[in-house]
Image (cartoon, rainbow, N blue to C red):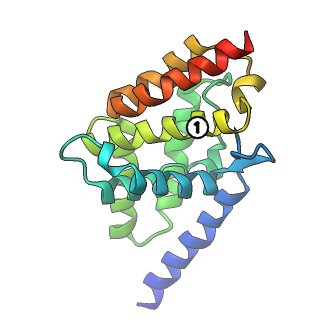
Amino acid sequence: MTARLDAQMAFLTEACKLKSVDRATLLCDGSRRENSGEHSWHLALYALTLAEHAPQGVDINRVIRMLLLHDLVEIDAGDAPIFGTHDPAATEADEQAAAARIFGLLPGDQGGELLALWQEFEANQTPDATFAKSLDRFQPPNQNLASGGGSWVEYNVDFDTVASKVGAKVAHGAPGLWDWIAPKIRAFFDARG
């Protein structure tokens, strides 16, 4: 039991580093950038709160677990902002290596289970993963709207860019959420001219 608990605590101590990874998205009040630990917690709360908008058959408990784990790889790989420029293949390779290392800190059975859940999220093919990915794309636009544009202003994007890079993923797993936010995003960009 001691070795198992030692491994679990090593993982939990390592996971604390996620709080030091800054993201491009500002907090809703615009006061500072959110960190990836805050983002993961907020997404779990999104899933809990918006569960009724999930497609039939989605297991919200699994979605919450995915969302709590989904960005742990950023401890090693860093955040790759959706509107930033980066090499997707290199980012994927970095994240895969990070996942193997970080989940490998856990006892084998537990690490394997959490790694499989992370891989399911990344593959975005099951109903649970698709809804989780949709929420991951739905949260930042809400924060950008609340903060006066946030990363949209910083990256100088327009509605069409947001719709293609964010909207398509939100609509894929949670069409009602995209239908709700798309007019708000369009109104923001229309007001900016």
**Residue of label 1:** 142
Residue at the image position 42 percent from the left and 54 percent from the top: 49
Element type at marker 1? helix
Residue at the image position 35 percent from the left and 52 percent from the top: 63
Q: How many residues crowd mark 1 within 10 Å: few (<14), some (14–19), many (20+)?
A: some
In which quadrant of the rendered image does the N terminus lie? bottom left
Number of marks present in the image shown: 1
Residue at the image position 51 percent from the left and 67 percent from the top: 105
Residue placed furthest toward the right: 31
Q: Is residue 34 above or below residue 191?
A: below
Residue 14 image-quadrant placement: bottom right
* x and y, in percent, of residue 20 in the image: 73, 56
Residue in the foreground of this view, choosing between 134 and 95: 134
In which quadrant of the rendered image does the C terminus lie? top right
Q: Is residue 159 above or below residue 51?
A: above
Q: Is residue 115 left or right of residue 99?
A: left
* x and y, in percent, of residue 140 in the image: 59, 37
Whether residue 69 appears in this view of the structure is no
Residue in the foreground of this view, choosing between 137 and 19: 137
Residue placed furthest toward the left: 57
* x and y, in percent, of residue 150 in the image: 73, 33
Residue 19 image-quadrant placement: bottom right
Q: Is residue 68 above or below residue 163?
A: below
Residue at the image position 57 percent from the left and 17 percent from the top: 186
Residue in the foreground of this view, choosing between 52 and 66: 52
Q: Amino acid at mark 1?
A: Asn
* x and y, in percent, of residue 120 in the image: 33, 45
Whether residue 100 appears in this view of the structure is yes
